[in-house]
Amino acid sequence: MAKVLRARRNARTIYARLVAAAGLASALSGVAAPTRAADDDPYARAEAWLCRPGASDLCAAPVGATVVQSDGSHAIRILKPNPAAPIDCFYVYPTVSEDPAGNSGMTSGPGEKRAVAQQFAAFASVCRPFAPIYRQVTIAGVEAVLQHEPLPVDFGLPYQDVRAAWRHYLAHDNGGRGVVLIGHSQGARILARLLVQDIEGKPEQRLVAGALILGFDVEVPKGRDVGGTFKTIPLCRTATQSGCVVAYETFPASSLPSDDSRFTHPETPGMEIACTDPAVLAGGKLDPILATQTNLLGQPPLDPGWAAFVKPLDALFVSLPGIASGHCVEGTNASYLSVSINPPLAPGAWPAALPGNLVVDGRLLKSWGWHLIDVNIALGNLIDFVSTLRRPGP
């Protein structure tokens, strides 16, 4: 019990050991999901969803951000939910559960709510939002696996739940509409498996307008856009594509991925890690929308410069158009989205750093890059791109 309680207290700091969210690849893909009874549909209950159209939830309220331009001028940006949006979004959140067990329960906690607020709620401005709760491998569960502690972890449950939610959505909510799959980290891994096993090559593929599979090693043959993780679904390369995948992993230009990086390195010979530049797909330059109060783990701003910058803004989010430039780096040993900070026109208008670093016990873990802000570094671009997507099939 003491170990479980300690894991819960340290849940946010041990997130750094989520090599299992990268290293659990074989476990998550190799365990057959248990079957449910035909009449056992937990997703028929409203409380099994963090977001659903028409509900009073995190996706029902406008998302407001303070816009800070390079000259120091301020404005307000409001992203209002659009109940008449022509497509749907189906979101699976990353590893954020602070539950003490190896798998989370079916009740949302602060981590799940924080992920939806920071990564997904703004998408309701361009699509109907669906975000199921699932029994993910928790931060404590990852810690137990890595430390060989006797805390039971069921690696089949996350995929089982998301697949059940997906099937419920198709049967009761889709109605032939286009849908965009959105996931990050553990959520991206689950959606990648869903695409491979339950969608690709099946009638459901004609419904998938696109997929944002972020912070996960999507593999493609070197120099190609299809044929690795996904056999027929290509990477998105232009603003006019649909039925394609956006995939990238973010590193600051000042810190190249190391050989022990949790990401960017393919496991399959002849493959490379997919990188699609979100700025190319929408807007022409990166459009970050970043949380100001806490990062994805609930930690307050760790960088003093960032903390000083956001403190007087009195806003939950800040939009920084033009602060960052990115491009895909496709080296011999790593492929990733490299991001640089641009100097502002007015000195001091922007902070010198973004809140993407993972710090544990005061130690910067460079091998994780800016995993914490994979979504938010280009959230404005991703929202704009999703707004253009339509179902590819008849």
Image: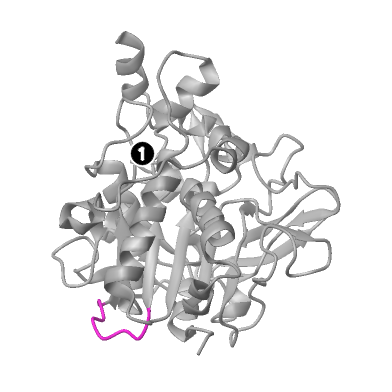
Name above or below for residue 348 compared with residue 147.
below
Name the spot of residue 333 as percent of width and height, x first.
82, 47
Question: Can residue 122 be seen in this snapshot?
Answer: no
Residue 286 drawn in magenta: no
Name the spot of residue 346 as percent of width and height, x first.
50, 70
Query: Helix or strand or loop: what does disc 1 sit on?
Result: loop
The answer to whether 194 appears left or right of 328 in the picture is left
Question: Can residue 275 be seen in this snapshot?
Answer: yes
Q: The magenta stretch spans which residues? A: 80-87
The answer to whether 78 appears left or right of 259 in the picture is left
Name the spot of residue 106 as percent of width and height, x first.
25, 42
Considering depth in this image, is 96 or 270 the residue closer to the camera? Answer: 270
Amino acid bearing label 1: Gln
Residue shown at 64% from the left, 66% from the top: 326
Is the N terminus in the top left, top right, bottom left or bottom right quadrant? top left
Give the residue at mark 1.
299
Considering depth in this image, is 280 or 132 the residue closer to the camera? Answer: 132
Residue shown at 49% from the left, 51% from the top: 190
